[in-house]
Image (spheres, rainbow, N blue to C red):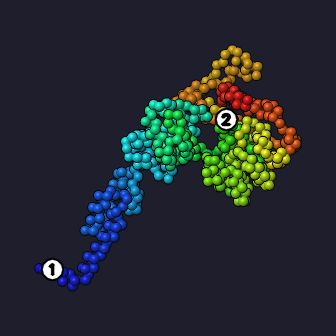
Amino acid sequence: MNFSLTDLYSEPLLLGIIAAWFVLGIMMASMYAWRRDSPTGQRLINSLLFLLIGPLFFPAWLLGGTLWRMLRARSPFVDSLKAHLAGDELVVSRVVVEDYDPDGSFVMYDTNGQPVSSKSIGKSEKAAAGLRLTHEIISGAVTQKASDILIHPVDDTTFGVRYRINGTLRNVQEVSDDEGKSVVNSIKAISGMDIAQRRRPQDGGFTARAAHGNVSFRVATAGVLNGEKVSVRVLDQSASAFSLGSVGLSQSEQSQIKKALSAGSGMILVCGPTGSGKSSTVHAMLRTIDSIQRNVITIEDPIEYILPNASQIEINTKAGLTFASALRSVLRQDPDIISVGEIRDAETAQTALQAAQTGHLVFATVHSGSNMAAILRLADLGCQPELIASALNVVVSQRLVRKLCDHCKAKEKFPDAEKAELWKQAIDPDSLFGARGCTHCHDAGYGGRTGVFDILVLDRELRDRIARGAVSKEAESSGHQMSAMQIRATQMALSGIVSWEEVQRVAASGD
């Protein structure tokens, strides 16, 4: 039986099927062959197969690509199928880290929210080794509940890695110069920084998913002697459920704070040196407020903890968004409660006090050594004494003390001379405990921190003194502010919560 093109033309149905087959092959080739997730050589082969055998090749292409993704990315079948159809670029996020994190319990994400792999920072084995070490350092800091990570050149051959745990820096390890530079480059790459720029200070950040929740990291670099230093601030969102009790406020202190929070207006000012827990205390106060029925707006640098149902603004000085400019903007948004991360300049102080005077409840922090010093600080910034007296309701001064590890604390032994001094202060030396160190606390001897506070509620007499400008530095040096915190710290030492060394440190920090 002979078959010719004339016979084909006499069969319109067959002709239509062949034409449809050819068109469908072209469509499939254009849709699926030339995709970014396929190598160039494979794209050419896919195109020819789609054009020649069209729909018959589609099931094989679909199944093969899905299985390839399942094996490479370790993802479920359905997710692999969807990704293959969508043409998403393959990201093998666990291939590099599986050697030291087989269960994938700690995954870092770059500034764009993409899982970090060797592809993020380079394809060389050196880059992969640097990422492994970076992962080890970052995950170790989260495990040990460090607040900061410092990576810096010790000399021209060595880099040092330190964690700040419970407010104290600890040496973790030393690595070679090549390893240190590779870690620095890895952190800069995932933080969205320019790796080639080593002298100009840069800022960035990244996130991670740990077993207990999400963690954010703020990164800052600076050129130093022998190389480049990286400072990483660890912001663990799982630790953000603060309460007035959890930050260390006693029952009587909590009653004072709650009474102040019930006021419809005025300022609550929290003061202390850097790293004394001021932001945590403010967040604990804000969490006691019904933020659904009241419009709560915070201005922070940076946003450390997520506050449900509140509007949180992060300042950006490079873009011209400062505390002062953000505060002016916030006042036009009908706020009930305003939280100012830090009073740094005269305009912020003046605007915050005026807002507190005109029907807003304002929270703010300021760097100062005591309650009276905080009031003097506002005056030094140019605020009128009458404005301070009328707007300020409560001043809270605080310090952080390290709590002893419950697993290894032991009775402290003192020399006879020191025992005699303690007895003069009506303190039983045999009731005091000291730090030892064990596996539970990573040989530090301490487990967490808590606050000691002194709360000053402004009464009519003090308001009159402030308005007359009668609050002077003699009032600051009277010793009242520090003694209140010392008494609280001493009580905690006698209860075995803190060491006597911490009590002395609190007293020394007020000198």
Q: Amino acid at mark 2?
A: Leu
The reply to whether residue 483 is visible in this rendering is yes
- Secondary-structure class at tag 2: strand
If the image is split into quadrants, where does the N terminus sit? bottom left
Q: Determine the residue positioned at 43% across, 49% down.
A: 120
Residue count near mark 2 (Cα–Cα under 10 Å), binned few <14, some 14–19, many ≥20: many
Asked if residue 162 lies left or right of residue 472, the reply is: left
Count of number-bearing discs: 2
Q: Amino acid at mark 1?
A: Phe
The residue that disc 1 covers is: 3
Find residue 227 and report its horizontal and vertical position in percent.
50, 36
If the image is split into quadrants, where does the C terminus sit? top right
Asked if residue 156 lies left or right of residue 251, the reply is: left
Q: Determine the residue positioned at 50% across, 53% down.
A: 112
Residue count near mark 1 (Cα–Cα under 10 Å), binned few <14, some 14–19, many ≥20: few
Q: Counting residues from the N terminus, which is met first, the one under dot 2 or under dot 1?
A: 1
Residue 84's image quarter? bottom left
The reply to whether residue 140 is visible in this rendering is no
Asked if residue 506 lies left or right of residue 136, the reply is: right
The image shows residue 31, relative to residue 255, as above or below, that is below
Q: Determine the residue positioned at 53% across, 30% down.
A: 171
Find residue 276 and report its horizontal and vertical position in percent.
67, 37
- Secondary-structure class at tag 1: loop
Q: Determine the residue positioned at 65% across, 49% down.
A: 300
Q: Which disc number belongs to residue 150?
A: none
Find residue 85 and report its horizontal and vertical position in percent.
38, 62
Q: Which disc number belongs to residue 400?
A: 2
